[in-house]
Amino acid sequence: MAMQRSSAPSVGIDPAAVTAFADAVDAAGLGVHGLVIARFGRVAAEAWWHPYAPDEPHMMFSVSKAFTSMAVGLAIAEGALGLDEPTHAVFPEHPEVPGQTIRHLLTMTTGHDRDSFALMRPMPDRDWVRVFFELAAPYPPGEHFVYDTGASYVLGAAVSRRTGLSLTDFLQPRLFEPLGWPRPHWERDPRGQEHAGTGLKLTTRQLAEFGQLLLQRGRWEGRQLVPADYVEAASAHQTRNPWFASHESRIGYGFQLWRSTHGFRADGMWGQFAAVIPELQLVVATTSGSFDANRILETAWRHLLPGVDPAFAPPTGHPDGAVFTPGGRRVPDPVFDEADASREAALSGIRFRLQGNRLGVDELTVEFAPDQVALVLSGSGIVAERLVAGRGGWVPGRTALWPEEQLPEVPYAAWAGWTGGALEVHQQLTGTPLRRIWRLEPDSAEGARLIVTFLPDAGPEAAEDLLLTARQ
């Protein structure tokens, strides 16, 4: 069942502090696009930055690790795993890492000196568990922290090995259903095993509910879903983590949960946070697209927490349902020039052929209408798709051209216009933190060119620059 909803003042939160936090993340360009704040088990404030919406599941990235940790805790409680059980006892067919236990996987102190998941992903034909155990472990387990998503993957595989269920099937009746959630999407490897350390999709509200479950030490609506002693251990300081430069990423690590300046958190790349602050009975959940994600936490400490009254008593009356929303929030809108009618007339009806690319698009045509622009994309390995974008605002749609996930299609909102002599279509992929920008330059020095980039920039593979061949 969803959490109760109540006005911010009724739980001791100053609405001005919520607005100050939202204003500050916007002013700093921190890319927050979903926010839920709860206190005493009641949602008191929430916002989504248009075109993001409350009910759209969002990529959680490493927040997934926290759910895998809860699955391990449940498996331990049911006698299927032992916290200090050697990993070789679970996977005796693979090379042994002497002294390595389930606890070491949970605390990222496996003995490795690198992230093994980065080795697994390019090897779809290999057994990824074996890749993990074949990797050299130059440190004694327990002595050296290395952030290793591969360790989380092996934890998920251990739960599956000992329970006979996939990670999702194991958690469905124990966690997801009692929380009132539909079965979530979780990315899987070529053998069908969940990625475990990443790949889960949840809404911002579900992320806040998970934070509330952790705050309540695994208890939900009178039921103990996860053992309280395990949640306490998972959220406590288990090991030093001097692996990252940011202060918030060096305070300490538990069992797939991070310690924070205030409380602890489930943490996913680009600012997917369920920050839990027990001393204030507060949960702050964000979904975001930020390359400086820890500044979101620092901004919350600076602007939000001063508006939370530490002496305020938990409310006893019925919730009033008046959740505070800090104004009409929007992701940054693209800035375009005036429409270029002559260029549009010249482009209309031309079929462009593309060289090989990751999306599998072979041909592109542009269609212009008074209120929208459409990119018509086709290829030998894809169903022809019309990417429709509004001229004066975001227009929603769904796309199958998203190789980063195994879903058949994902939602987006798109906006098109001309800038610097090029046609740009901004495609905000609203189940993700990412904006894909299609930039068609009809008259570049090399000829017609299509440049596809992502914001935030995810590195070398975040951009493709393709020369086009026109076919009438």
Image: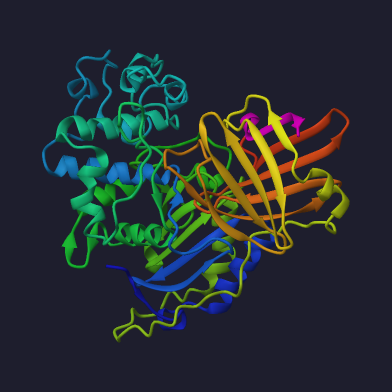
Q: Residue 277 location, x and y as percent?
A: 41, 61
Q: Residue 459 location, x and y as percent?
A: 63, 33
Query: Which residue is at a point 38% across and 17% down the rendered structure image?
Result: 137
Count of labels shown?
Answer: 0
Q: Is residue 453 above or below residue 425?
A: above
Tell me if I can see residue 104 in this picture.
no
Would residue 138 appear left or right of 74 to someone viewing this image? Answer: right
**Scheme by which the image is coloured:** rainbow
Q: Is residue 188 above or below residue 40?
A: above
Magenta-colored stretch includes residue 463: yes
Magenta-colored stretch includes residue 141: no
Outermost residue to the front: 472
**In which quarter of the view is residue 158 placed?**
top left
**In which quarter of the view is residue 366 placed?**
top right
Between 201 and 291, the one lying in front of the other is 201
Please state the extent of the stretch shown in magenta in the rendering: 459-472
Q: Residue 317 location, x and y as percent?
A: 30, 87
Query: Which residue is at a point 26% across and 20% down the rendered structure image?
Result: 99
Would residue 93 appear left or right of 347 to someone viewing this image? Answer: left
- Quadrant of the frame with the C terminus: top right
Between 41 and 117, the one lying in front of the other is 117
